[in-house]
Image: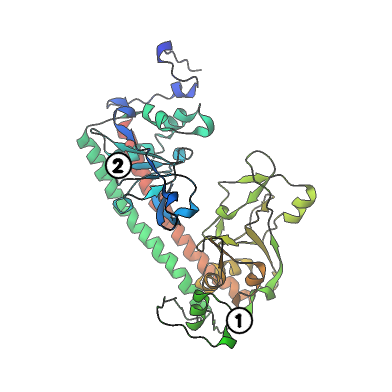
Amino acid sequence: MQIVTTLYKNLTRWDIKNYLFKLKSSFIVEELKNYIYEHSEKEKIFKEHEKEFPILGVTNIDGVYLNKYVKGKNINQSYKKVRSGELAYNPYRVNVGSIGIVQEEYNNFYISPAYIIFGVKEGLLNEYIYLVLSSSWFNPYLRAATSGSVRQNLTYDLLSQLKVPIPSIQIQKNIIKEWHNALKEAQKLKLLAKEKEGMIDDVVLSELDIKKKEYKKTYDVLVIRYKNFKRWGISYNDYVRQGLLDIKSKYEIIPLKKIIKNLQYGTSKKANKTEGVPVLRMNNIINGELDTSDLKLIKLSKREFESLKLIKGDLLFNRTNSKELVGKVAVFDLDDDYVFASYIIRVIIDHKKADPYYINMLFNSSIIRNQIDTVSRQIIGQANVNTEELGEFKIPLPPLEIQKNIINKVMKLKQEINRSQNLEQRILEDIKNRIGKMLVA
């Protein structure tokens, strides 16, 4: 048992954890309020209806990144304008590393008012405080700071009360130099993984004897005979003209519907965090695989549950959202019971004709990606693919044995990619831990 004694005049919060986690260092430990300022000004960008605004996001992988461009008419609130060098974080996810520095190329871009933006004053370097706040060694202190707040929300006021080691500027610079050296090593691994990711599509096309075709945007006049005019979309007809939908392979080309047993839309019931069965949504499909780290629940009747319960081998297709997100696909391969949301189409494959992992691989290749980009049409600002269009996608269908051979080659590449990515993360985590050992007594 640990007993903590504090003077009543120093009792600013009632949660115990805040007083149990005290950071000790050979350097001076001070509250951040002496070294940071909040940037909370907002702009009413929704008033400029036709102007497109660059909107940033923050993740624990990419830090601050360009999320999307949005027209003012599609925004319903004021947004914060950021400045390069400032730090931005998600107050609900900073304890899992969702924090980053605004890079020069993002200067004067915008971010949701839900994010906390702050800058540093004299005596503190932005990269140094980023390393402290994003490190696993500091995480217990960070969590303790939010333990008494709703949903572990690290407000700016709580951030300013955090006590951190403040070494001299020269020591901070030395720490940052070590960090940059580690970043260079990690960057080599990142580029290697990216190179191998690019090889996946080449392997699939080569194995199926398909020549790679890339869309080249044209600016000349597009002339089409009316009898050949199937759709009004300019991009669709440009794809047709460039032959991007003409797939030629040494194997039979068939419409996807020939190997599909059934297509089904998911539930539109509202998800929650407290009761019901876990539901797989669009954000659970990442890079052709399922990620269940962020799950929600849906309350269903027994009949509804039985109808929507997923079976191993089902293919989950994201049918609507932005053009980049439409067509995200993953094979359901989990042991527990799950259902799926309305943005998802469940594709039940005839396993006697096709391996679902082979079809998943095709969806994540340029073979079907070109078709998705062509077919998905804009509906109220969103792209969309329905079940009929999905069934018409053309695919090469080799024998099952050949399908499995191609899957194995792609899986081998993915394993090499994972090794590079894991080593990259280990290098960055190790340097942060070494810095932590130097800062914490």
Picture layout, residue 318 above or below residue 439? below
Q: Is 298 displayed left or right of 166 in the figure?
A: right
- Report, in whole angstroms, how far the alpha carbon at label 1 lies from the one at label 2: 53 Å
| Residues packed near mark 1 inside 10 Å, few (<14), some (14 to 19) or many (20 plus) | some
Q: Residue furthest top?
A: 8
| Residues packed near mark 2 inside 10 Å, few (<14), some (14 to 19) or many (20 plus) | some
Total number of numbered discs in the rendering:
2
Marking on residue 365: none
Do the CB atoms of the residues marked 1 and 2 lie less than 8 Å apart? no
**Residue depicted at 24% across the width and 45% down the height:** 177
**Can you give x and y, in whole percent of width and height, for residue 57 in the image?**
43, 49
Res 7 quadrant in image: top left
Q: Front-most of 26 and 81?
A: 81
**Residue depicted at 39% across the width and 65% down the height:** 195
Judging from the image, what secondary structure is the residue with disc 1 in?
strand
Picture layout, residue 115 above or below residue 367? above
Residue wearing tag 1: 253
Query: Does the image show residue 331?
Result: yes
Q: Front-most of 69 and 195?
A: 69
Res 259 quadrant in image: bottom right
Picture layout, residue 52 above or below residue 86? below
Query: Does the image show residue 441?
Result: no
**Can you give x and y, in whole percent of width and height, for residue 324 in the image?**
50, 62
Q: Mark 1 or mark 2, which has the lower sequence index?
A: 2
Q: Is 38 displayed left or right of 92 in the figure?
A: left
Q: Residue furthest right?
A: 303
Amino acid beneath label 2? Glu
Marking on residue 127: 2
Q: Front-most of 74 and 243?
A: 74
Res 34 quadrant in image: top left
**Can you give x and y, in whole percent of width and height, for residue 311 in the image?**
70, 58
**Residue depicted at 54% across the width and 68% down the height:** 408
